[in-house]
Image: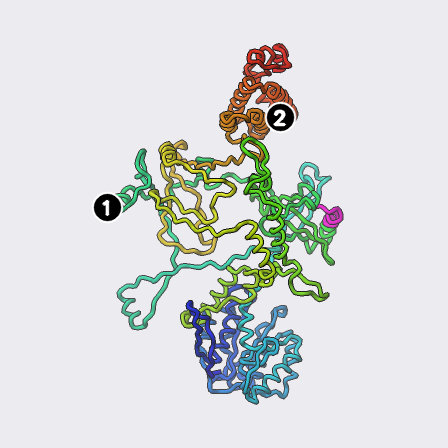
Amino acid sequence: MGATRSVELPPTPNGEQRITEMTNLEWALQFVKLKIQEMIFNGRKTDQCGVILFGSEETDNIIHEKNGGYQHVSEYIPITHPSSTTLAKLDALQPSEHSGDPIDALIVGIETQDIYLNKRRTWTRKIVIVTDGQSPMEIEDWEATVKKMNANAISLTVIGVDFDDDEFPFHEEDKSTIKVENEAFYHKLTSALDNGLVGTCVFALQEIARPDMKQTKSALMGTVLRLGDVDVRPEEAIEILVKASKCTTLARPKSWKKFGRREKTNDQMQVDEEEDMTVFAQLKMRSEYYIDHSTKEGEEQDKMNTGSDDEEDNDKNLEMVQKEQLIRGFKYGSTYAPCPEGQFRRLNTRKGIDICGFFHAKNFRRELAMGEVQYIWADPGAPQQQVALSSIVQAMYEKGVLAIARLVSKDGMDPKMGVLEPRVDTNIDFLLWVQMPFADDVRKYTFACLEKLVSKNGESVTKHPYLPTEDQLEAMGKFIDTMDIMDSGEKDDEGEPIPWYDTRQSYNPAIHRTKQALFHSAVVNDITSNPLPPPHPELLKYINPPKWALKASKDAIAECKAVFKVKEVPKKAAKVRKDGHVRAMDEDEDMLLLDKKPAASRKGKELAASQVPVSPKLARPAKESAASDSETEEESDQEPLLLEKRPFNALPTPERSMSPDVDPGRAPGRIIGSTYPLRDFKSNLAQGDVVTKAVEDMGVIIKEVVLRPFASRRHKEMIECMIAMRDTSLKEDEIDAWNAFLRDLKESCLKGAGNPEFWQEVQKLGRSISLISEPEAKKLGGHSEFSESASEEVS
């Protein structure tokens, strides 16, 4: 193992190839350390290991102590939980001039393992031999060793330095006679075992970097599945004792900690100069809270600090406060609501899963599923509960329905709404639960139709640069067809092609590349001379599209470029702005489907800024040092903190963000939106030729807003809209439209779940907002089917 070899390193940033020299022992130990590092990384209690050396100078093993023999075999690391100390001991190993028998080491390993696992018969036993195949072996009674290993269900893996491998493929030239014979014996030994394998070291090092899924056995958590109201109607309800466990869980890359050089005292500096050591300490976060008194009425907000005097003045304006003086505040609209207790009162909930109803599986919206999936099993120790749950699962499966369920993990915890899906397996029936959003968790955005354009006059446009032509649609269809990869993968056992992309083999590069970097840094002594190797090919399998797909779509892409007249647009040089705090625009933020970008004048911006009231600032934390660790290590009190003994009306009010020019409440095809209906109505009347459309849309908007929940907040605004609509209808001869609208509004407000309170407010206004009568219409040259008395009766 002391022979040196040339090992290729990753190329330099300039593309130059690099080669380093290392011994076979150093090269093979990379595999050993990576295997042990995997156990450290997973952190399972049942992952334990030990290291036995053969060919060591000393002899230290349990068989030698009892019976003698087994020379130059040493138990270097006893079986225990691996740690960084384990890796440090492996780094201290050096090649030896003594020869040891691998079979002796194998027997010692079997005996050591058997004694340690005497009372742990269910544990999985593995032995890995790492060798160069150059050591002489006594193979007379190897069959007895095989019987003992099969009896204890021990798996054996032999990793050989420069062993031949037809599948990799790899074949060593000028191999010694003893290595040929030993390699043949290892194949014979592993083939006689129930679970044995021989591999070459170069392939093992490559495969150990292969991304894999971490599969763990989730603990069963007891809960109750309820159907019906067990409190009000217990005779019509049922309760089933069930167990919940994780089906899937979110995987995240390991977070990093920050370290800094520890400041040394004079005594430590003298000691370190002799030992040439640098000590690092982990940096932890500390928060301090200040009140900034420099912000006053009329004072300039964006003040540039250009000298040390300004910085000293700013420090004088900061008043440090203790965390105990602060209370937690939650943002509510444009203000902050204080919460002295840290959180508001929770709902009085009860632990369990309550089935609220059922719906057809075809109506399930898969895109709304959120969070992790959980198994819902019947209690393994209660046959009656298993039969009860199985009956529900079978009924749901036969009817093709899913259940809406409310899950509460503990008494008093916030409830979660989700969906239960039945699963009928060969030996067991169970349910799958996945969380679904509440109604206010889903934001619905309306976008203009890409296939239809409406002019400012409300007319449909058939030809426009934003509307695709038939040639463009055909060219894009060909391009999509050539990029189809559903039937372009490898063939299955029946000779049928399978899809090229498989989600089960698509790994997260962030997780596995971080893991690979972490492992590599832990097993190599110098990251500079031995840099991180490239990612495993399986990790890059789906990063780029397949070459054959790019080749097949080449002509279709050229056709699309020609039909769509695609041209490269040069980047515009960014203009230097005086207000340096305005963020830079991203490349993909260009306005789409607009002829020109709406611009706001500088004067308008300054006017708007001057009208915003200046409010006291929040006490903001000043982070002196940060440790980007996992979520559990970060401070949990990241909500805004408010000063105590401050009246509620003096709480800080954040500035309102500028609204976009596009009204999100305006439905496609309408010229009046629900956000600012009166403003839209007046602006459209000023354009002319859209009076009929404006009156029609205003009536629809008023009705929609009035019949919405919590419409009382906009009653006054809707009455103003009605007054403007009635006045316009009377002057512009839209009398019939107004009268029809008012009768329909009255009917809608007074029926079922309408809004009778709003209609009462309309009635209080009397004749000024009622139907337009014939005498009123005649004054302006119009006509109405209602007399004066009829108009008063309807009102």
| Pointer 2 or 1: first along the chain | 1
Q: Residue 412's x, y, as percent?
A: 56, 43
Above or below — where is 407 with respect to 487? Answer: above
Mark 2, residue position: 754
Q: Residue 156's x, y, as percent?
A: 60, 76
For residue 602, side relative to residue 752 (left or right): left
Mark 2: secondary structure: loop
Q: In terms of depth relative to the viewer, which is nearer, 659 or 287?
A: 659
| Residue 386 visible within the image | yes
Within 10 Å of disc 2 (Cα), the crowding (few <14, some 14-19, many 20+) is some
The quarter of the rendered structure image containing the C terminus is top right
Query: For residue 463, which quarter of the picture?
Result: top right
* Magenta stretch: includes residue 751: no
Q: What residue span does the magenta drawing correspond to? A: 391-401
Query: For residue 454, which quarter of the picture?
Result: top right
For residue 312, side relative to residue 13 (left or right): left
Mark 1, residue position: 309
The amino acid type found where label 1 is placed reads Asp
Q: Main secondary structure of the magenta part?
A: helix
Within 10 Å of disc 1 (Cα), the crowding (few <14, some 14-19, many 20+) is few
Q: Residue 343's x, y, as percent?
A: 48, 41
Q: Residue 138's x, y, as percent?
A: 59, 88
For residue 557, side relative to residue 532 (left or right): right
